[in-house]
């Protein structure tokens, strides 16, 4: 599979502060690739360097095999970007916004109107297509933003926090759209601080923290390798922990305040042990997830800074 985005040891400084540190990643054609990390991790800055509006302090970025530093116009013509904050004209309707944006890409009639009609249909904007954007809900605005980023039929779609702040039903419908785009052959690069979103949508993720990549891989692979399939959670003291885990040295463990988290291929024996020690103690047994990977790698919760 060909490589669409190639980021090699990219760093970014603002004054003396390094906000991205030696980030390397490769996005393959047809992948949904996620930059996952809490607020301030450096996700948006990394994206900006990928689509060529922020210059790296060091390192290089190639998109479609082109050097973004010297060929940013050629690169930008072939990709679509949905920024973290919706960029649209509030007084205009979705159709008018799409028209303005299409003209920016030098699309002419009748192609422009055809494409607008397709996108209004595809992103289910029809019922509100002629209402000023200012009157639209957050979910509609987000769908319009995605429609706008698709106007030039980009090969690569970049989505910065596509579902942040949206309610669960709207998030679900946007996830479906992202999956459809991927099924239609688009390469998708997105950022999110929702580990469930990354786990559902992404074939491959880079987990970022404080400007650096903490680890990267497919969500399944990261979970299996870094924590194990199962997770067990209970509130307990250090003395109780000692009793609970006695003889279970092969299981991984972490603490988040009073909460003890234990990971492994099979944590069911812990349930029996806890039952012997304190039959009434509440506990949780669940599949391990990317949140656990983040916690295991950084010692902090993913959404803590969100
Ligand atoms: N133009 C800028 N000037 C100075 N600092 C910036 C600038 N852009 C981002 N930062 C800082 O870089 C860090 C990473 O920001 P950002 O890439 O937006 O993170 P994320 O998208 O993961 O939330 C933040 O601490 C932010 O304040
Ligand atoms: Mg951001």
Image (cartoon, rainbow, N blue to C red):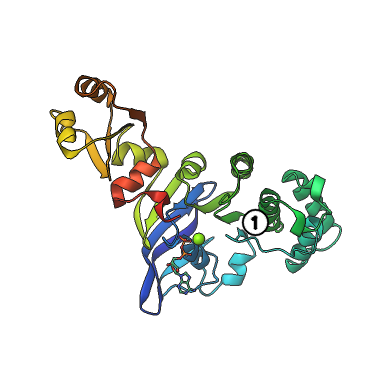
280 or 78: nearer the viewer? 280
Q: Residues within 10 Å of mark 1 (few under 14, many from 20)?
A: some
Callout 1: CB less than 8 Å from ligand 2: no
Residue carrying label 1: 154
Provide residue 262's location: percent of width, then percent of height: 26, 35
Extreme-front residue of the structure: 280
* Left-right relation of 41 to 117: left
Number of numbered callouts drawn: 1
- Place of residue 45 in the rendered image (x, y in percent of width and height, measured from the top left): 48, 66
Quarter location, residue 169: top right
- Identify the residue at horizontal 52%, vertical 42% (top origin): 201
Q: Residue furthest right?
A: 110
Residue 64 % position (x, y) = 54, 60
**Front-most of 260 and 226?**
260
Q: Position of residue 13 (x, y in %)?
A: 40, 74
Q: Secondary structure at mark 1?
A: loop
Q: Is residue 47 above or below residue 300?
A: below
- Left or right: residue 12 compared with residue 140: left
Seen at 53% across and 50% down, the residue is 29
Residue 168 appears left or right of 128: left
- Examine the rendered structure and indicate whether residue 183 appears above or below residue 27: above
Left or right? Give the position of 203 relative to 233.
Answer: right
Choose top left, top right, bottom left or bottom right for residue 235: top left
**Residue 209 to residue 174: above or below:** below
Q: Is residue 50 above or below residue 117?
A: below
């Amino acid at each position: 599979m060909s490589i669409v985005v190639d980021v090699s040891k990219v760093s970014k400084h603002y004054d003396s502060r390094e906000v991205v540190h030696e980030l390397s990643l490769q996005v393959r054609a047809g992948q949904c690739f996620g930059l996952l990390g809490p607020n301030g991790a450096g996700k948006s800055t990394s994206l900006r360097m990928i689509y060529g509006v922020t210059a790296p302090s060091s390192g290089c970025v190639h998109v479609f095999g082109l050097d973004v530093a010297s060929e940013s116009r050629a690169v930008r013509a072939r990709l679509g970007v949905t920024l973290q904050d919706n960029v649209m004209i509030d007084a205009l309707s979705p159709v008018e916004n799409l028209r303005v944006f299409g003209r920016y890409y030098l699309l002419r009639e009748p192609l422009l109107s055809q494409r607008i009609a397709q996108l209004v249909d595809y992103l289910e904007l029809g019922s509100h297509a002629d209402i000023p954007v200012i009157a639209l809900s957050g979910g509609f605005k987000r769908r319009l933003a995605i429609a706008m980023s698709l106007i030039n039929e980009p090969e690569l779609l970049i989505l910065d926090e596509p579902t942040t702040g949206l309610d669960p039903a709207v998030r679900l419908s946007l996830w479906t759209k992202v999956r459809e785009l991927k099924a239609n052959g688009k390469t998708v690069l997105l950022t999110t601080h929702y580990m469930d979103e990354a786990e559902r949508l992404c074939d491959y993720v880079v987990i970022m923290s404080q400007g650096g990549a903490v680890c990267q891989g497919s969500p399944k692979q990261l979970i299996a390798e870094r924590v194990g399939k199962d997770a067990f959670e209970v509130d307990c003291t250090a003395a109780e922990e000692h009793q609970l885990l006695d003889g279970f040295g092969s299981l991984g463990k972490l603490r988040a305040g009073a909460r003890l988290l234990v990971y492994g291929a099979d944590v069911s024996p812990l349930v029996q042990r806890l039952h012997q020690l304190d039959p009434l103690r509440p506990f949780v047994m669940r599949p391990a997830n990317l949140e656990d990977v983040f916690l295991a790698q950084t010692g902090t919760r993913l959404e803590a800074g969100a």
